[in-house]
């Protein structure tokens, strides 16, 4: 029996965010960076009740295998974080620049978006500024203007990565089977 689809939100603000979830490292960590941006809908309006999760390697390219990724003790890097958007659609993480997991691989941060109106979560990647598009299989397979939607930019507050759910400049989303 088939049941109708349901959207994946907007209950996130009550059930899933937790204290310190956006801090993969403490702000005082010597390699701490801020990854921030805004989640926008197809009309360019902010999405005030989205939830974002990131997974990433540490600065040396090691994928953490620490148990208890919800635990924040101030020094163990678990490589995972969760942040909700605020009323203006803004989000922020405190993390480190990921390293390449293998020689010749392009480092990135995996990002998942949950939001009102989505029938399933969306998967994408955040590449650091200045990456060689030709060196990465995903970036090189996309037209340049589409690949650019996966690249963070540098601003005075850190790395900026806006997520556009639909329309012009829509972020490239990946299929995850």
Image (cartoon, grey):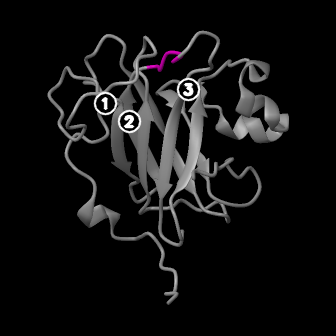
Residue reaching furthest right? 143
What residue lies at 64% left-to-right and 11% top-to-bottom?
104
Snapshot quadrant of residue 63: top left
Q: Are marks 3 and 2 in contact (CB under 8 Å)?
A: no
Which residue is labeled 3 in the image?
155
Q: Are marks 1 and 2 in contact (CB under 8 Å)?
A: yes
Mark 3–mark 2 Cα distance, whole angstroms, equals 15 Å
Q: Is residue 92 above or below residue 74?
A: below
If you read the primary sequence from the N terminus, does the residue marked by circle 1 or circle 3 appear first?
1
Q: Which residues are magenta?
A: 97-101
Mark 1–mark 2 Cα distance, whole angstroms, equals 7 Å
Neighbourhood count class around disc 3 (C-alpha, 10 Å): few under 14, some 14–19, many 20 upward = few
Which residue is labeled 1 in the image?
24
- Say which of 37 and 112 sits in front: 112
Q: Is residue 58 above or below residue 39?
A: above
What residue lies at 50% left-to-right and 42% top-to-bottom?
111
State the SS at label 1: loop
Q: Is residue 70 left or right of residue 95?
A: left
State the SS at label 2: strand
Which residue is labeled 2 in the image?
93
Q: Main secondary structure of the magenta part?
A: loop
Residue reaching furthest front? 1
Neighbourhood count class around disc 2 (C-alpha, 10 Å): few under 14, some 14–19, many 20 upward = many
Query: Within the magenta stretch, is there residue 39?
Result: no
Q: Is residue 71 left or right of residue 145?
A: left
Q: Which mark is residue 116?
A: none
State the SS at label 3: strand
* Disc number lying in front (1 or 2): 1
Q: Position of residue 56 (x, y in %)?
A: 44, 29
- Say which of 164 and 158 sits in front: 164
């Amino acid at each position: 029996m088939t049941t109708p689809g349901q959207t994946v939100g907007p209950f996130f603000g009550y059930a899933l965010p937790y204290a310190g979830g956006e801090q993969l490292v403490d702000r005082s960590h010597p390699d701490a960076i801020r990854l921030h941006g805004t989640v926008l809908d197809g009309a360019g309006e902010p999405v005030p009740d989205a939830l974002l999760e990131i997974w990433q390697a540490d600065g040396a390219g090691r994928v953490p295998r620490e148990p208890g990724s919800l635990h924040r003790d101030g020094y163990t890097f678990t490589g995972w974080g969760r942040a909700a958007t605020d009323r203006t659609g803004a989000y922020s993480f405190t993390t480190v620049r990921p390293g390449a997991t293998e020689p010749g691989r392009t480092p990135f941060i995996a990002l998942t978006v949950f939001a009102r109106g989505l029938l399933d979560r969306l998967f994408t990647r955040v590449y650091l500024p200045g990456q060689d598009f030709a060196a990465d299989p995903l970036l090189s397979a996309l037209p340049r203007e589409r690949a650019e939607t996966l690249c963070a930019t540098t601003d005075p507050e850190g790395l900026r990565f806006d997520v556009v759910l639909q329309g012009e400049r829509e972020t490239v989303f990946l299929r995850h089977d």
